[in-house]
Amino acid sequence: MECGLIGKVLVHSYSQIIHDSLGLYKYQLCELQPEEIPAFFEKKDFMGINVTIPYKQTVIPYLDEISEEAKEIGAVNTIVNRNGKLYGYNTDCSGLTALINKAGITVAGKKVLILGTGGTSKTATYVAKKLGAKEILHVSRKASEDTITYEDAVTNHKDAQIIINTTPCGMYPETDNKPIDISCFNNLSGIVDAIYNPLKSQLVVDGLNANIPSTGGLYMLVAQAIYASGHFCSKDPDLTVLDSIFDSLIAEKRNLVLTGMPSCGKTTIGKMLSKLTGKELIDVDKEIVDKIKMPIADFFAANGEAAFRKIEAETIKELSLLTGKIISTGGGAVLNPKNIINLKQNGEIIFINRPLEDLMPTSDRPLSSSKEHLTKLYNERFEIYKSTCNYEILNDTTAEAAVEKIMKITGGQKNEC
């Protein structure tokens, strides 16, 4: 192997995409079980590798030399093979620093909670100290001389100002999880989560919903990869490509989620966006029909709205795990707050706001089969659509005009194929 990534589970990894975009070497993913580590390092069949969970400390005894920074941190994520000697570095610290700066989060003088005790936790501690944190507390499931419990954190440290999550809690595919409930903390000014798949973990979504500067770990991943490439190629890293690679990756992986009233134009706009961007269009209602094997109106009549909403929530949860899609939701999807959280983890929600006078009742929509019902729904849901979206698009002329607005505000990339 020329260059690559070793870890225990790598199905969630975007590292190969990032390194391939640099075009400097061949890069591949290599899943290893713990018992395979000794043989891997005995062969030394690589030019350079990155290391991820759970091996950032495991690899250290196999190295000939370790950078001073990596020694101080106590974790290695980048290894270079130079004539049979293995040199270890930690580029996560530069990546995390870049992420915190990108998010506009100030650590200096703040009380910081670092969730987790693994290799990334050690990196976060190093970075927080370098950035001038006033106090740093490590949070773990069990208390020790160096850690406090999560219960202790939410009970006795409600004044914490920064939370940095270095655990895998909330990572794909277990995206329903979150390591801590931030509602207990009344003084937060920043949340940083090293998780990058989903793009926004539940912890990050909670923070953004509370108007707290919050960020997932994708920018850190890109930045540390570029710093690692410098070690692989024995030259200064080209940081000028950092933002462009990050923006391209976000544009590729992000879902565009369309919400709005029945007949507001979601399907038409979704089809046009799909053609422009190359992203697959997924219609939630069609997915539900495939599950229930009958028209939605018939299901409503036979089973009631509550049963339908349950299936709708399950379907949205499944679709929210996907990336790089256009998702057209049913008119009532926004009524369940959990749907919004799930949709925002990998997506930006776009409210297609079509004036009431332009909306049309149809018989296949059980709650909007008449103008009277449609008006009632509009009045009940309008503010929910507005409060749950990332962007609002007024669709009062043509679908083409609405699509143009969406492409402009989301920075959507056109499909060149």
Image: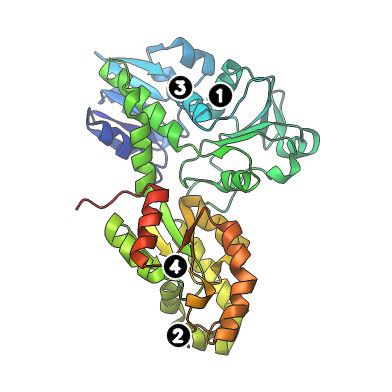
Which sits earlier in the primary sequence, circle 3 or circle 1? 3
Which sits earlier in the primary sequence, circle 4 or circle 2? 2
> Secondary structure beneath disc 2?
loop
| Along the line of sight, the residue nearer the viewer: 86 or 415 | 415
| Along the line of sight, the residue nearer the viewer: 112 or 66 | 112
> Secondary structure beneath disc 1?
helix
User: Mark 3, residues whose alpha carbon is within 10 Å: few (<14), some, or many (≥20)?
Assistant: some
Indicate the quadrant where residue 310 lies: bottom right
Residue beneath disc 1 = 122
Q: How far is the residue under mark 4 from the one under mark 2?
A: 29 Å
- In which quadrant is the N terminus drawn? top left
User: Mark 4, residues whose alpha carbon is within 10 Å: few (<14), some, or many (≥20)?
Assistant: some
Amino acid tagged 2 = Pro
Query: Relative to 70, does residue 339 appear above or below in the rendering?
Result: below
Q: How far is the residue under mark 1 from the one under mark 2?
A: 54 Å
* Mark 4 in CB contact with mark 3 (< 8 angstroms): no
Residue beneath disc 4 = 396
Which sits earlier in the primary sequence, circle 1 or circle 4? 1
Q: Residue 92 location, x and y as percent?
A: 46, 25
x 45%, y 31%: residue: 220
In the shown orientation, is residue 415 left or right of residue 130? left
